[in-house]
Amino acid sequence: LHDALPIFSKISFPDGHINLEIFEKNSFSILRNELEEVLKSKNQMMSSVIDSINESCYETLDDVLIEDDEDYFTISPDYYKKLLNND
């Protein structure tokens, strides 16, 4: 998916990109501990990755892409589609 989203080509991590399809497959919401496990496997710190993605997306969305809802991280389906379609 990150190849389809030009904004994500700007976000570079040592082991590659976070795959945002994980949010889509989970109804745009993922448990905090699940995302943390995925990022740990890539030797990434969750807060740094989330902040980096949100900063990169803010200019396009005028909002953050990934929201922290205590036990979950969520993505607005509309924002996801907007980025996917380059709107």
Image: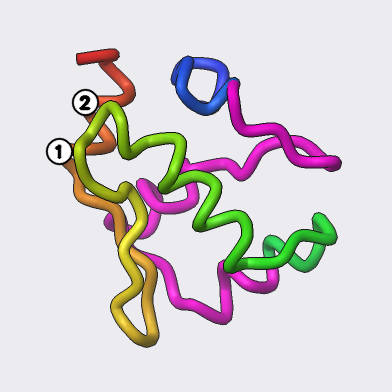
Residue 86 - label: none
| Residue at mark 2 | 82
Q: Residue furthest bottom?
A: 71
68 or 23, which lies in front? 68
Disc tally is: 2
Give the answer, above or below, for where 71 lies relative to 74.
Answer: below
**Left or right of 53 in this view: 40:** right
Identify the coloring.
rainbow
Q: Residue at x 35, y 72 (%)?
A: 68
Q: Badge 2: how crowded within 10 Å, few (<14), some, or many (20+)? A: some
Q: Position of residue 9 (x, y in %)?
A: 59, 21
Label 2 sits on a secondary structure element that is: helix
Q: Position of residue 52 (x, y in %)?
A: 55, 47
**Residue for point 85% across, 41% down:** 14
Residues rendered magenta in the picture: 10-37
Does residue 83 appear left or right of residue 44 in this picture? left
Q: Position of residue 19 (x, y in %)?
A: 57, 41
The part of the image, by quadrant, that contains residue 72 is bottom left
- Where residue 29 sits, quadrant-wise, is bottom left
Kind of residue sitting beneath label 2: Lys
| Residue 29 painted magenta | yes
Which residue position is annotated with label 1? 78
Compared with 84, 21 (above or below) is below
The single residue placed furthest to the left in the displayed view is 78
**Cβ atoms under marks 1 and 2 closer than 8 Å:** yes
Helix, strand or loop status at disc 1: helix
Residue at horizontal 76%, vertical 60%? 44
Location of residue 26 (image quadrant): bottom left
Based on the picture, tell me whether residue 76 belongs to the magenta stretch: no
* Amino acid under disc 1: Asp
